[in-house]
Amino acid sequence: DIQMTQSPSSLSASVGDRVTITCRASQGITNYLTWYQQKPGQVPKLLIYDASTLQSGVPSRFSGSGSGTDFTLTITSLQPEDVATYYCQEYNSAPLTFGGGTKVEIK
Amino acid sequence: QVLLVQSGAEVKKPGASVKVSCKVSGYTFTNYGISWVRQAPGQGLQWMGWISGYNGNTNNAQKFQGRVTMTTDTSTSTAYMELRSLTSDDTAVYYCARIPFDSRGPSTYWGQGTLVIVSP
């Protein structure tokens, strides 16, 4: 099974800051990676798929990059509404493992 | 529009089983799969498995092997997830989500979640 290691597990940043979350796969998954945002009490929301493709309707301050084993989710200018937990998930092969999550808060 | 509507909250005793339904609308059920994901209180997302809406083929996470059964009813565009031999560790919100027919893609649409509480 592929393991997905996300870091950091939590972070606190100021409004307007650039925020970077990383996700590392235990083996190569080409670009079969997605990022979800989950706000408290809500259903996960798709942000990015195929590692770097922005889902329709998602603000352009979110971006994804990477391939193989190392991936990054970047928020270029953190906004108050971005407070959430972010998860990566691989879909290269079952089980479709999630990362442990990164909780993003405003400083 | 695409909707996935799940059955309501359940409270079960340890050792019992629970069956959660996920009725979809707004797309052709057999053209996609359904993934099941759970989230224990205060914890992260855990993938349980997926089922093809086309032919009912399944692939379950090893953690749940022998304890979970995923099925579909194409006549009603409904997917089901049954989990047996429940323990308190199974207390969680259970989500269904639409995935591509071959599972190689993201979950764009999610059900609202079903809270399952396992308590003596």
Image: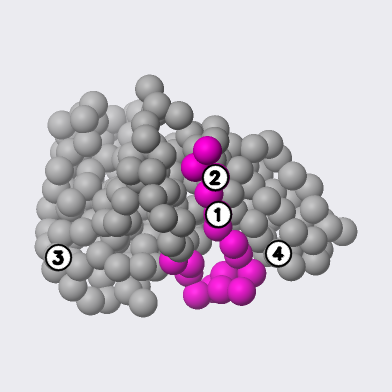
The amino acid on which the numbered mark 2 sits, given as a three-letter code, is Asp
Residue for point 78% across, 47% down? B11
Q: Pointers 2 and 3 in contact (CB under 8 A)?
A: no
The amino acid on which the numbered mark 4 sits, given as a three-letter code, is Arg
Front position among marks 2 and 3: 2
Q: Tell me the quarter of the image containing the N terminus of chain B.
A: top left
- Check disc 1 and report its element: helix, strand or loop: strand
Residue B59 is drawn in which quadrant?
bottom left
Question: A33 or A61, which lies in front?
Answer: A33
Crowd band around label 2 with a 10 angstrom C-alpha radius: few (<14), some (14–19), many (20+)? few
Q: Tell me the quarter of the image containing the C terminus of chain B.
A: bottom right
Q: Earlier in the sequence, mark 4 or mark 1?
A: 1
Q: Report the side of B110 relative to A57 (left or right).
A: right
Residue for point 22% across, 36% down? A55
Question: B16 or B101, which lies in front?
Answer: B101
- Check disc 4 and report its element: helix, strand or loop: loop
The amino acid on which the numbered mark 3 sits, given as a three-letter code, is Thr
- Check disc 2 and report its element: helix, strand or loop: strand
In the image, residue A101 sits, relative to residue A3, either above or below, namely: above
State yes or no: residue B67 in magenta.
Answer: yes
Q: Are marks 2 and 4 on the same chain?
A: yes
Q: Which residue corresponds to mark 4?
A: B84
Report the span colored magenta: B59-75
Gap between marks 2 and 4 measured at Cα: 20 Å
Q: Chain of mark 3?
A: A
Question: Taking the image as drawn, is residue A10 in sight?
Answer: no
The tag on residue B73 is 2
Q: Which residue corresponds to mark 3?
A: A30
